[in-house]
């Protein structure tokens, strides 16, 4: 049976070496003209456009003002991220490279499914020298709904890479949001507690297998290919 493995990259494959809240701060200030108050850690796994909308609402920006300037904010986030940290070193989490290599050896179609911005994720993977392991991606700057995002990835894998009907589809992620979406999309999930969420939270979200980090990649591989 063929396998499609969709990976939510942040805090799973790579991790910024410092707090990068400044890039969101700068993007919102550029678009909306004020200095927002927020904690970026509270938005792990949340699609980028929904994150921005929530930050604006909590900072009492009117719905009319949000709608007026929201288009183009994703591009501004990508630009700001590059300026803040996009040329610095990035951490490749332990076991991540070996996990991707093993998936390729076993013939899986490996893609990206994330609520983050395409330019940001591509920048991270290029700095980590890992971009070659991913055949395609679906991103939060194009789709707010994580279930629809996963479904789009499945259709694309079928059209572009010959994924057969009935193939096994897996999400590997560190946040409950996309794990819950995977179940709604008819996919299975491996939860990896290398981000801000516990193994218990990932299990409660519906992950079939939960590991502490990709140091335990053999358990993830066994689940995906059993």
Image (cartoon, grey):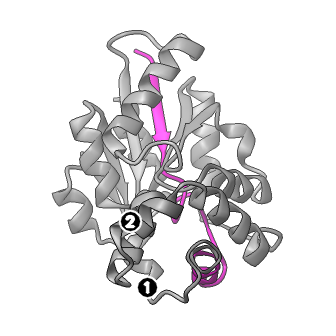
Residue at the image position 35 percent from the left and 24 percent from the top: 168
Which residue is the site of mark 1? Answer: 39
Residue sitting nearer the eye, 185 or 219: 185
Q: On the picture, is 173 further left or further right than 160?
A: left
- Image quadrant where one finds the C terminus: top left
Report the mark closest to the observer, 1 or 2: 2
- Marks 1/2: CA–CA distance: 24 Å
Q: On the picture, is 64 further left or further right than 27?
A: left
Residue 192 picture location, percent across and down: 39, 59
- Image quadrant where one finds the N terminus: top left
Residue 34 image-quadrant placement: bottom right
Q: Dot 1, how many residues are within 10 Å of its Cα: few (below 14), some (14-19), or many (20+)?
A: few
Residue 38 shows up from this direction: yes
Residue at the image position 45 percent from the left and 63 percent from the top: 213
Which residue is the site of mark 2? Answer: 64
Q: Dot 2, how many residues are within 10 Å of its Cα: few (below 14), some (14-19), or many (20+)?
A: few
Q: Residue furthest left?
A: 204
Residue 77 higher or lower than 104, as above or below: below
Residue 226 higher or lower than 102, as above or below: above
Q: Which mark is residue 144?
A: none
Residue at disc 2, secondary structure:
helix
Residue 161 picture location, percent across and down: 58, 15
Residue sitting nearer the eye, 2 or 26: 26
* Segment tinted magenta in the rendering: 1-26
Residue at the image position 34 percent from the left and 39 percent from the top: 223
Residue 185 picture location, percent across and down: 27, 33
Residue sitting nearer the eye, 18 or 143: 143
Residue 215 shows up from this direction: no
Is 205 in the magenta?
no
Residue 6 picture location, percent across and down: 47, 38
Please count the marks in the image.
2
Q: Residue furthest right?
A: 87
């Amino acid at each position: 049976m063929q396998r499609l493995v969709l990976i939510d990259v942040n805090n799973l494959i790579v991790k910024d070496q410092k707090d990068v809240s400044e890039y969101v701060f700068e993007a919102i200030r550029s678009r909306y003209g004020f200095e927002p108050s927020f904690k970026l850690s509270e938005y792990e796994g949340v699609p980028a456009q929904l994150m921005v909308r929530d930050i604006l609402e909590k900072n009492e920006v009117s719905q009319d003002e949000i709608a007026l300037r929201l288009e183009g904010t994703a591009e501004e986030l990508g630009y700001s991220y590059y300026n803040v940290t996009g040329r610095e070193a990035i951490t490749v989490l332990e076991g991540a490279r070996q996990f991707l290599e093993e998936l390729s050896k076993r013939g899986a179609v490996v893609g990206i499914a994330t609520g983050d911005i395409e330019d940001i994720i591509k920048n991270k993977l290029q700095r980590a020298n890992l971009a070659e392991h991913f055949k395609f991606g679906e991103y939060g700057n194009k789709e707010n709904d994580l279930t629809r995002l996963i479904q789009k990835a499945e259709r694309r894998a079928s059209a572009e890479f010959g994924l057969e009907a009935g193939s096994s589809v897996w999400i590997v992620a560190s946040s409950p949001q996309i794990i819950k979406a995977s179940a709604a999309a008819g996919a299975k999930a491996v939860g990896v507690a290398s981000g801000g969420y516990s193994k218990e939270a990932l299990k409660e979200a519906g992950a079939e297998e939960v590991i502490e980090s990709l140091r335990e990649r053999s358990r993830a591989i066994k689940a995906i290919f059993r």
